[in-house]
Amino acid sequence: MAGSNVKVKTKKAGKSAAADAAARMPKKLYEAELFRLQAELVKVQEWARAERARIVVIFEGRDAAGKGSTIKRVSQYLNPRVAQIAALPAPTEREQTEWYFQRYIEHLPSAGQIVLFDRSWYNRAGVERVMGFCTKEEYTRFLHQCPIFERLLVEDGILLRKYWFSVSDEEQQLRFRSRLQDPMRQWKLSPMDLESVTRWEDYSRAKDEMFVHTDIPEAPWNVVESDDKRRARINMIAHLLSTIPYHAVQRAKLSLPPRPPSQGYQRAPRDMQTYVPDHAAALERGTH
């Protein structure tokens, strides 16, 4: 990325592209199972609506570990009014003066909703801790309050699921390099993302300490090995489904009503409205 002085290492010798491909889940098998699991997620959505359940799924992990792409597969066929993605920006000046968990609370689900947190309150135990964006006192207070906060959510009936996407340093660097070279995905990288390369062990220690305090019986952490993104998505979704007591909900059958006879309506002349140019036709003619 322009302006960054962090160098990303190339793949270590001895691990060929062919070996990588052989280790990946076969695409055809992956796509078939993903579609099956997504159909089950639709059932979960309808169950949540019918039972007025509240579901929170937290996606955490290393940069470039595949959290975002997994969230896309989870939500792909779901109603965005039911399954919402919460990806909060950096806190505002006002939010910095509030109780730390306060801005996350307003994104918690109401009855019949699912919220997918693309990173969450665990920012304090990760990037804020490592990069020095919070004080030692704020960090210590978070480790004390977080288990209490999550127990309160669970006690109130929220189904809370937490996933940590684990990626090797070698695979992370390969993904960073791929993004650096791809103009369509460079937006996924920031100088802070690349700085995580030089702070790998700091993040590892922060993650280990976070697990010690927040891997609680009421809301345990579930680690997803994500060097192979296909396997990671399949494994994560399958596990999530196995933890939710959903069942198929019978929906009322719908049928199209007969179209009524015309009452004399006539469409307005085309020249009275502004239409977008037919870019597709220009492409077909080869005149673009």
Image: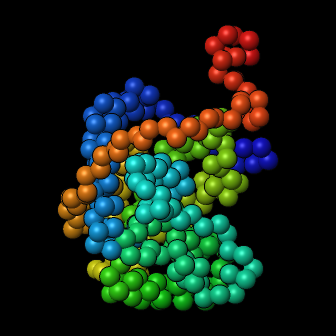
> In this view of the protein, which residue sits in the foreground, 3 or 201?
3
Q: Which residue is situated farthest in the right direction here?
A: 3
Name the one closer to the observer, 189 or 132.
189
Look at the image and tell me in which quarter the C terminus lies: top right
- Return the residue found at the far front: 264
Visible residue check, residue 246: yes
Place of residue 160 in the rendered image (x, y in percent of width and height, measured from the top left): 36, 73
Residue visible at 36% across and 41% down in the picture = 258
The vertical placement of 185 against 239, above or below, is above
Q: Position of residue 96 (x, y in %)?
A: 69, 82
108 up-or-down from 114: above or below? below
In the rendered structure, the answer to whether residue 274 lies left or right of residue 174 reads right
Q: Between residues 106 and 121, which one lies in front from this camera angle?
A: 106
Specify the quadrant that holds the N terminus.
top right
Q: Quadrant of residue 132?
A: bottom right
Left or right, residue 134 beside residue 246:
right
Q: Position of residue 78 (x, y in %)?
A: 40, 54
Tell me which corner region of the image, top left, top right, bottom left or bottom right, holds residue 271.
top right
Q: Is residue 139 visible?
A: no
Residue at x 35%, y 86% (from the top left corner): 156
Q: Is residue 14 left or right of residue 234?
A: right
- At horizontal 44% and vertical 86% (from top left) the residue drawn is 149
Total labels: the figure holds 0
Q: Position of residue 99 (x, y in %)?
A: 60, 88
Indicate whether 241 appears above or below 121: above
Identify which residue, 262 or 111, lies in the foreground: 262
Determine the residue positioned at 38% across, 30% down: 21
